[in-house]
Amino acid sequence: MPIGAHVDADDPLGTARERGAEVVQFFLSDPQTWKSPTPHPQAAELRAAGVSVFIHAPYVLNVASTNNRIRIPSRKAVIAQAEAAAKTNALGLIVHGGHVRQGEDPAVGVANWHKFLSRQAAEGGFAVPVLIENTAGGDGAMAKGLDALARLWDAVGEFEPGFCLDTCHAFASGEELSGLVERVRAITGRIDLVHLNSSRDAFGSFRDRHANIADGTIDAAQLVAVCAEARAPVIVETPGAGQAADISHLRRELGV
């Protein structure tokens, strides 16, 4: 169970060493733009140092969108991000489930995911596994809460996408963390990565604001339990100044 952190792309290896991270996650392009990704120059160094890598896709991507000007570029961007991630020796690419606009039928967004994964499967799949991540809020979101996640997986499960479980997002969406891993696995059949984050806000707030383990509103023991039950790599996406303490806490409590 490697434990690490989301870090800046400037010097992921140096940051991993500073924070005691065995695995890192970072962006290969600006997360708020459509800029094309490039493989990271430290790819070989990270691999030689034994530091595993995950890549997070930009936030602007929305495969579920009913808007052609967003959905089609999003599909192309996921493919390009996966190719750059493969050249960075990444274990996977994390992609948010996306959403449809207010008043639109979420079933259309689910169908858009199915079409995308179906077409890509016919063309040989992705360069690295694509991990769909649960999200915190939005009435038209594809992966907000387990009911929405189940609808999505009913449509895309045949293509065996990966899944990334974010604890802050689950908590914010109104999902109790106790027993969460078992409930998620009953839907997806898998958990490939855990984003282990506490929350700055109350349960069911639908707000995506991460906090360090010691400072957040989620019981620390519940966060540790999620990691123990998931048995997957763990990434803390918490404020950087407290990441080393978060990683140390998890290692100590998990005995790894």
Image (cartoon, rainbow, N blue to C red):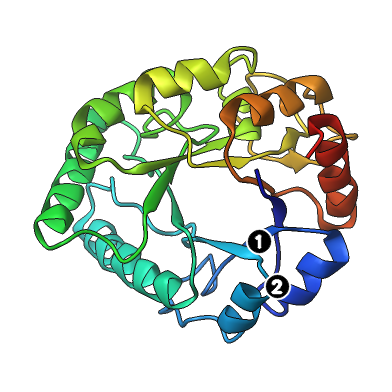
* Label 1 Cα crowd, 10 Å radius (few <14 / some 14-19 / many 20+): many
Check the image and report above or below for 224 versus 28: above
* Label 2 Cα crowd, 10 Å radius (few <14 / some 14-19 / many 20+): many
- Comes first in the chain, label 1 or label 2: 2
Q: Which amino acid lies under the numbered mark 2 shown in the image of this protein? A: Pro
SS at circle 2: helix
**Residue where numbered disc 1 is placed:** 24
Picture coordinates of residue 235, whole percent (x, y) = 66, 48
Picture coordinates of residue 210, whole percent (x, y) = 73, 41
Task: Tell how many labels.
Answer: 2
Q: Is residue 152 left or right of residue 208?
A: left
Q: Which amino acid lies under the numbered mark 1 shown in the image of this protein? A: Val
- Residue drawn at the location 54% of the way across and 22% of the way down: 181
**Residue where numbered disc 2 is placed:** 12
**Mark 1 to mark 2 CA distance (whole Å):** 7 Å
Picture coordinates of residue 162, whole percent (x, y) = 38, 43
